[in-house]
Amino acid sequence: MTTDEPGNWQPTTGTRGSHEHRTSADTTDVVAIAQTWLAQDPDEDTRDELTALLADGDPAALADRFAGRLEFGTAGLRGALGAGPNRMNRVVVAQAAAGLAAYLAARAVGGEPASVVIGYDARHKSDVFALDTAEIVAGAGLRAYLMPRHTPTPVLAFAIRAFGASAGVMVTASHNPPQDNGYKVYLGSGSQIIPPADTEISAEIAAVGPVSMLPRASTWTPVDLDALLTDYVARAAAVAGPPGTRDLRIVYTPMHGVGGEVLLRVLAEAGFPEPKVVTAQAEPDPDFPTVAFPNPEEPGAMDLALALAADSEADVIIANDPDADRLAVGVPGPQGWRMLRGDELGALLGDHIARTEPASTGGFAASIVSSSLLGRIAAAHGRPYVDTLTGFKWIARVEGLRFGYEEALGYCVAPADVRDKDGVSAAALAASVAASLKAQGRTLLDALDALARAYGLHATDQLAFRVEDPSLISAAMQRMRDSTPVTLGGRAVEGVDDLGEGSAELPPTEGLRYTLAGSGRVVVRPSGTEPKLKCYLEVICAVEDDEGGIDALAVAQADADERIGLLATAVTDLLGLTPPVLA
């Protein structure tokens, strides 16, 4: 589910404002449904919540929880914790586990029972949801393997392939706010589910009866996590390459998540000096007390790491999101420390692999909202390249994949082991690249400048419109479809792709893509994990030769900044949503 795919997110504020005209009969129905739900709810917290709502006679609050349900899709489930089918809770999780078990049992072959490996992060209720899943899977006659403690998402994805499991479940809401949790489902390939598996599992979930009647068993098997981590750490450390220069001063933050222990072990095994860790964010904490949103991309989330890096004269910042499937990297520059964009790090990692490995090791892939630079790098080195839909469930399935990424800080650097984004293995590779450059007297920013001179300056940015009312997003998308712009940011619109219609190359997904004259593009799509409309901007500016004392790269950067600014203004005006957030 980080991955950010439309169709699975449900608003944490519920369906506010949509029940104002309910009749008394409707209210009576909601009360009856809530009472039926209460009878099967095994969780004291949500029973108390629901009992209080029934006692208060609050039909709007009840309708908010019971008028709909969290949709199970290609990103599994994700939503706010609370009572009712429109929230994440033990009833919803039990239904999901039973539906998944039924789906797997119907497809088991060779007389052997299907198997599911289950992991969880440190969010509220994650351990409870994971244990419920193990008991219900085992009660359905399948083999269930449960992690004995919280662990990063990439370790769970690794375990699926290591165990030869039929499926995997990771209980996590990744980088969502603290009130959320989620349920991420993988199949035996180690990749997240894609259609039609999502709708088929959803149909099995819908057929589940009262969860109080589901058979449960304690015959699940605890994972030998020490042995599993030993294997995973060795594989992740190997991503850094053969022993070489490891002189690198690192500042690290796990963002109150579960990646710290594993990442520090990987860096140590790869031979790097021990990083300085942001103390206030070092231990798992489901309340994420030092950040508004536990996402390295969000404003303010990296302030503590940036301050520590400046004070300690570090060479690089490494950050994971709370479940450690994403990686952010910060670097010092002429104007002080800054975080690299996902597109920048994706290009750096891809270029390193392209230059240091033979093309026979495989092809590259990136999502359609990511920079086009990786495709140019792949072509220059004779590697296949594929554009995919947003989400690692698509990137990881590219045949012959060697490296894939998407701009939202996700990188698949060891697809033979983890068929998903992996912020821990990617950190080992990023540190190796930074250390090699340092040994040459260069930095990651120097390497980016070299890429710009070789392939043109690929400048990207993102507008994120966070809304309270999700209907504003669908209305904005409809306005875009009803009124196709002739120009955007002063550039002619040369082509428009309605991604919802699909194509020979891409399955349908909600979104619009505009191709602009003079090398540029805009993609507009709803977020799949948050109440946001996202707009991805890219311009490409040629970098001429330095002549007459002119810094051609600086000229290209100024041109790109101006064009990005004009695009941002044009898209904002067209959407009619305010205020945007430049990500």
Image (cartoon, helix red, strand yellow):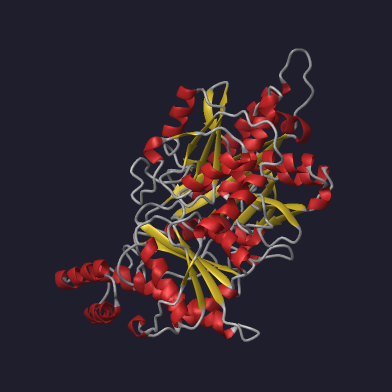
Residue sitting nearer the eye, 425 or 242:
242
In this rendering, position of residue 407 left or right of residue 350: left
In this rendering, position of residue 347 left or right of residue 329: right
Q: How many marks?
A: 0
Residue 52 location (% of width, % of height)? 18, 68
Q: Residue furthest top?
A: 549
Residue 463 location (% of width, % of height)? 52, 44
- Seen in the picture, residue 570 relative to 222 is either above or below; the reply is above
> Does the image show residue 154?
no
Q: Residue furthest left?
A: 55
In this rendering, position of residue 8 left or right of residue 290: right
Residue 101 location (% of width, % of height)? 50, 79
- Which image quadrant for residue 44? bottom left
In this rendering, position of residue 264 left or right of residue 282: right
- Which image quadrant for residue 554? top right
- Seen in the picture, residue 306 relative to 132 is either above or below; the reply is above
- Seen in the picture, residue 27 relative to 372 is either above or below; the reply is below
> Which residue is pictured at 45% across the width and 55% down the height?
530
> Does the image show residue 384?
yes
> Which residue is pictured at 78% across the width and 39% down the height?
355
Residue 158 location (% of width, % of height)? 59, 59
